[in-house]
Amino acid sequence: MRTAACFLVFFLFSTGCAGLSFAQRHGVHAHTDVISQSQAEGVDYPALLQQAADGDPDSLVRVFSLQGLNAAGSQSHAFFLWTVVREVGDEAAAAAYRRCNTAARIRFTDHLAFELGISEETPDAAAARIALAADPDFRRDFPALAAAIGHQ
């Protein structure tokens, strides 16, 4: 009986069915760098991530377009950005990306290239964006988003 109860608790938490927010599931509040930097820009970062992860198109665009982050905040944001993209899926992420202006698209792809380790393998940011759009694993898992990035 105890094993079954432990399995049920594990299942609920691992699938997000336990009612945990995005911030709770992914430890957003531990990343005070990105939270404080976002607050300086007038953004409630945990709330914005939650709305974006819930699939709100305007919130996705705001998350993709977030600016005013220094190195530490930018690194944390890259992780959460990639996590949001995986949660909302390819089509929603591609639609939000297409709604972003050019500067936001560049920031978005720079963050993803950093988080996926692609920027470490390329000589500059422009090459990293091209490599991200051409990455076979990324194209397989996110074909619409990869196509949108490739047409930047």
Image (spheres, rainbow, N blue to C red):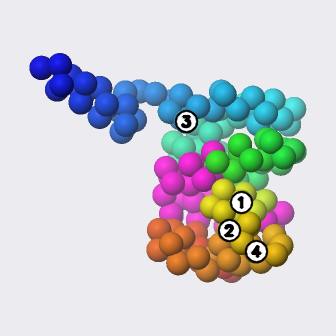
Asked whether residue 50 appears in the rendered view, the answer is yes
Q: Is residue 95 highlighted in magenta?
A: yes
3D distance between C-alphas at marks 3 and 4:
29 Å
Residue 123 x/y as whole percent: 82, 75
Judging depth in this view, the residue of 134 and 51 nearest the camera is 134
Residue 26's disc number: 3
10 Å neighbourhood of mark 4: few (<14), some, or many (≥20)? some
Q: Quadrant of the N terminus?
A: top left
User: Is 70 left, or right, of 63 in this rendering?
Assistant: right
Instruction: Check whether the beta carbons of the residues at disc 4 and disc 2 lie within 8 A of each other.
Output: yes
Q: Which residues are magenta?
A: 80-106
Which of the two labelled residues, at mark 3 and mark 2, occupies the earlier sequence position?
A: 3
SS at badge 4? loop
Residue 130 x/y as whole percent: 71, 78
3D distance between C-alphas at marks 4 and 1:
10 Å
10 Å neighbourhood of mark 2: few (<14), some, or many (≥20)? some
10 Å neighbourhood of mark 1: few (<14), some, or many (≥20)? many
